[in-house]
Amino acid sequence: MFRKMTRCEKRLMGLAFAAALMAFLAYIPSLKNGFINWDDNLYVYENPDIRALNAGFLVKVFTSYTAFNWHPLTIISYALDYRLMGLDPLVYHLTNIILHAFNTFLVALLVFKLIESAAPHWAGEGPKPDGARPALAVSFITALLFGLHPIHVESVTWVSERKDVLYSFFFLLSALSYLKYASQGRYGSYASALLFFALSVMSKPMAVSLPIVLLILDYYPLDRLAGLRNNIWTAGRIFLEKVPFFVLSVLSSMLTMNAQKSSLASIVVVGFMT
């Protein structure tokens, strides 16, 4: 059932793990941090909803807004942290760091797969027996830059930005699943891509851009749209594949706009009352 990994795949996994470990270690000091009074109160330490992980809680997070946003999976992740260690900030920061480390690992895999599609000889497929070395090096360096770049500091060290690292995790998994579907044609991989995308938009609406990203990947490096002029049916099928993704994007966008409207209404009411 499970095929044996090739030597190249083992190296890739090792390098991806090394990059993830370095990203994890870089953020260890943030475990000493506490909560801050900028949204952390709304999401965690003054949020009574996360203290009861039951059916009623699940219904509420899927049918209401938290801090004028709809991202139920993020709130569920806080509830899981609370179940583990209550309001100890350490567990919330640790979860963020672990998610960021996983994202770093996935970035290495994604970059290698993209190179494999665009330049097979760089990934060890072709006339050069050592062709995998450039692809492995680029994948490792890219993942390391992703994991250690200061642009992620806020997302990783601020508890309320859990939604960033969580949506990115599922976003990357969805892209990897789609690449597998595009290369192997397995509908199980397509279903996985759609499921991970749904989880991503439920973590943060920012994920709505994924369908466009998939179309870009179809054009390059997958080259699935090469026959657009010659085979309109094939092109139509490729665009039809994206319909469920776009439907989820539209639904998430509508929920987000509604949440922001409720936010604006609240600001107007408070301003009028004061």
Image (cartoon, grey):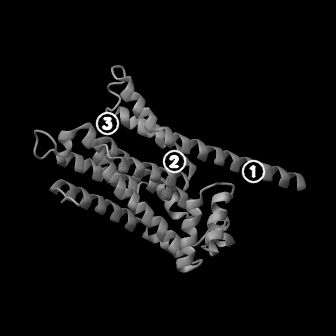
Residue 273: which quarter of the image? bottom right
> Are dots 3 and 1 in contact, CB under 8 Å?
no
Along the polypeptide, which appears first: circle 3 or circle 1? 3
Q: Which class describes the residues within 10 Å of circle 3: few (<14), some (14-19), or many (20+)?
A: some
Which amino acid, by three-letter code, is at mark 1? Ser
> How far apart are the two marked residues, 3 and 1, measured between alpha carbons?
42 Å
Q: Residue at x 36, y 32 (%)?
A: 219
Q: Which mark is residue 262?
A: 1
> How far apart are the two marked residues, 3 and 2, measured between alpha carbons?
21 Å
> How far apart are the two marked residues, 1 and 2, measured between alpha carbons?
21 Å
Task: Say left or right for 233 vs 46.
Answer: left
Q: Which class describes the residues within 10 Å of circle 2: few (<14), some (14-19), or many (20+)?
A: many
Q: Which structural element holds mark 2?
A: helix
Q: Residue at x 40, y 53 (%)?
A: 173
Q: Residue at x 63, y 59 (%)?
A: 62
| Residue at mark 2 | 207
| Residue at mark 3 | 222
Indicate the position of residue 84 as horizontal and vertical percent values. 52, 78
> Are dots 1 and 2 in contact, CB under 8 Å?
no
Which amino acid, by three-letter code, is at mark 3? Leu
Q: Residue at x 52, y 55 (%)?
A: 164
Indicate the position of residue 136 as horizontal and vertical percent values. 23, 50
Looking at the image, residue 45 lies above or below residue 4: below
Q: Quadrant of the C terminus?
A: bottom right
Which amino acid, by three-letter code, is at mark 2? Ala
